[in-house]
Amino acid sequence: QVQLVESGGGLVQAGGSLRLSCGASGRTFSMSAMAWFRQAPGKEREFVAAISGSDGTTYYADSVKGRFTISRDNAKNTVYLQMNSLKSEDTGGYYCAARPSSVAAETINEYRYWGQGTQVTVSS
């Protein structure tokens, strides 16, 4: 069983930055692919970024490429999402997810474990 706890959300002006953190329990964290998804009000949850559990290869949605960076610290069982140049359309709940595989994926159904989410609000 894996438990995920996100933190770092908040209110920020457009153009600003935030760093989200996701702490994970479980001995196999270093081998688990991790991802961030987000959900805006009235919209479906969508993929943001993922990182593999083997070599740390990263993947991004086109909408955040060049602005967001996903990273992980296996010693701390933590995955991060650095968000720069934030836009109003980045507003939403941000969810950390883990899957029992080292291979990263971009679809919701591939992830078994989910955090409760942290809210990000970008004011224009």
Image (cartoon, grey):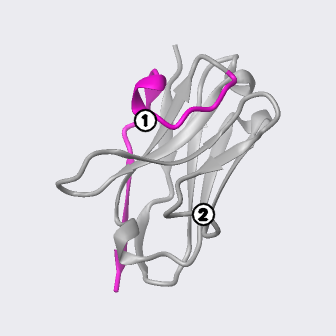
Check disc 2 and give the amino acid type.
Lys
Image-quadrant location for residue 90: bottom left
Q: Residue at x 50, y 25 (%)?
A: 3
Going from N to C along the chain, the mark reached first, 1 or 2, is: 2
Judging from the image, what secondary structure is the residue with disc 1 in? loop
Q: Label 2 belongs to which residue?
A: 65
Up/down of 119 relative to 123, above or below: above
> Does the magenta segment cover residue 22?
no
Q: Residue at x 56, y 43 (%)?
A: 22
- Residue 62 at what x, y percent from top left? 53, 60
Q: Nearer the viewer, mark 1 or mark 2?
A: 2
Q: Residue at x 48, y 24 (%)?
A: 110
Horizontal side, residue 21 vs residue 63: left or right: right
For the residues marked 1 and 2, what is the alpha-carbon distance in whole angstroms? 23 Å
Check disc 1: other Cα within 10 Å, few if <14, some if 14-19, many if 20+. Answer: some
Check disc 1 and give the amino acid type.
Gly
Task: Out of 120 and 86, give the one closest to the viewer.
Answer: 86
Q: Which residues are magenta?
A: 102-124
- Residue 122 at what x, y percent from top left? 37, 75
Judging from the image, what secondary structure is the residue with disc 2 in? loop
Check disc 2: other Cα within 10 Å, few if <14, some if 14-19, many if 20+. Answer: few
Up/down of 21 relative to 24, above or below: below
Up/down of 41 relative to 113, above or below: below
Asked whether disc 1 touches disc 2, contact meaning CB atoms under 8 Å apart, the reply is no
Q: Residue at x 52, y 81 (%)?
A: 16
Q: What mark, if any, has residue 115 been given in the picture?
A: 1
